Image: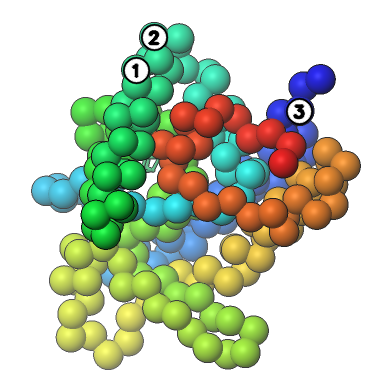
């Protein structure tokens, strides 16, 4: 039996639409700050993030499958090497700082299939909780330099985007007859998602 959590077409359309609106929200703030990645001496694809939905994991794999076989094999080798360095760093109590296996020559090779955190990284953002508390994310080092000393800093608010992503994760579960899927959260680096293959029924 194939127990892979594939994305039905209507859900694929929904995630594309959510990513498009994330990009719009990012662009609005970037324009207000006159911020872009052009000329940046850094490459933030070595930032360490964990990802929490099977939907984005499956979305990543849709992109991986479209790669030529040799390129996919090279990505998988880099992901294995990443995992070893990641585990060593975590065991030593350090935050890993390793180039993402999907970055080739400074560029993301799965740009259309990159995950939410990759899409929002850069400009300042915030997360407002239902009780009114607000968590702030200052953006990358370059953006922090840009906004230093400003009284008012525009931000991308993440709450509604995250809520939508959580709803789409539930929809993925429902499409596979797994109503509790969204509660069985995942917590994985991109390298781990690559090494483990596409997401399967828990
Ligand atoms: S997000 Fe910031 S650190 Fe990353 S490439 Fe763009 S400008 Fe550079
Ligand atoms: S998926 Fe792409 S954008 Fe995200 S960290 Fe990897 S190379 Fe960078």
Residue position for label 3: 3
Task: Note whether ligand 2 is within 8 Å of mark 1.
Answer: no
Q: Nearer the viewer, residue 200 or 123?
A: 200
* Residue 3, visible in the rendered structure: yes
Q: Is residue 10 left or right of residue 104?
A: right
Which quadrant of the picture is home to ligand 2? top left
Q: Nearer the viewer, residue 68 or 149?
A: 68
Between disc 2 and disc 3, whose residue precedes?
A: 3
Please state, as top left, top right, bottom left or bottom right, where the C terminus lies in the image: top right
Rounded to the nearest angstrom, the CA distance separating label 2 from label 3 is 26 Å
Residue position for label 2: 70
Rounded to the nearest angstrom, the CA distance separating label 3 from label 1 is 26 Å
**Circle nearer the viewer, 2 or 3:** 3
Q: Is residue 12 left or right of residue 116?
A: right
Residue position for label 1: 74
At 22% across and 76% down in the image, what residue appears? 147
Residue 124, position in %: x, y?
35, 70
Badge 2: how crowded within 10 Å, few (<14), some, or many (20+)?
few
Rounded to the nearest angstrom, the CA distance separating label 1 from label 2 is 6 Å
């Amino acid at each position: 039996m194939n127990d892979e959590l594939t994305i039905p077409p209507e859900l694929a359309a929904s995630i594309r639409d959510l990513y498009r609106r994330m990009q719009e929200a990012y662009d609005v703030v970037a324009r207000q700050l006159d911020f872009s990645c052009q000329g940046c001496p850094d490459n933030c694809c070595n930032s360490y993030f964990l990802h929490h939905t099977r939907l984005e994991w499956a979305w990543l794999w849709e992109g991986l499958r479209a790669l030529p076989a040799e390129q996919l094999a090279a990505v998988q080798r880099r992901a294995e090497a990443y995992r070893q360095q990641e585990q060593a760093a975590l065991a030593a109590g350090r935050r890993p700082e390793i180039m993402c296996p999907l970055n080739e020559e400074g560029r993301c090779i799965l740009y259309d299939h990159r995950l939410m955190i990759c899409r929002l990284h850069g400009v300042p953002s915030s997360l407002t909780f239902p009780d009114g508390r607000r968590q702030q994310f200052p953006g990358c080092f370059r953006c922090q330099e840009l906004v230093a000393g400003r009284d008012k800093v525009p931000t991308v608010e993440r709450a509604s985007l995250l809520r939508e992503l959580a709803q789409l994760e539930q929809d993925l579960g429902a499409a596979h007859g797994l109503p509790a899927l969204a509660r069985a959260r995942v917590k994985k680096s991109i390298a781990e998602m690559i090494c483990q293959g596409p997401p399967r029924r828990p």
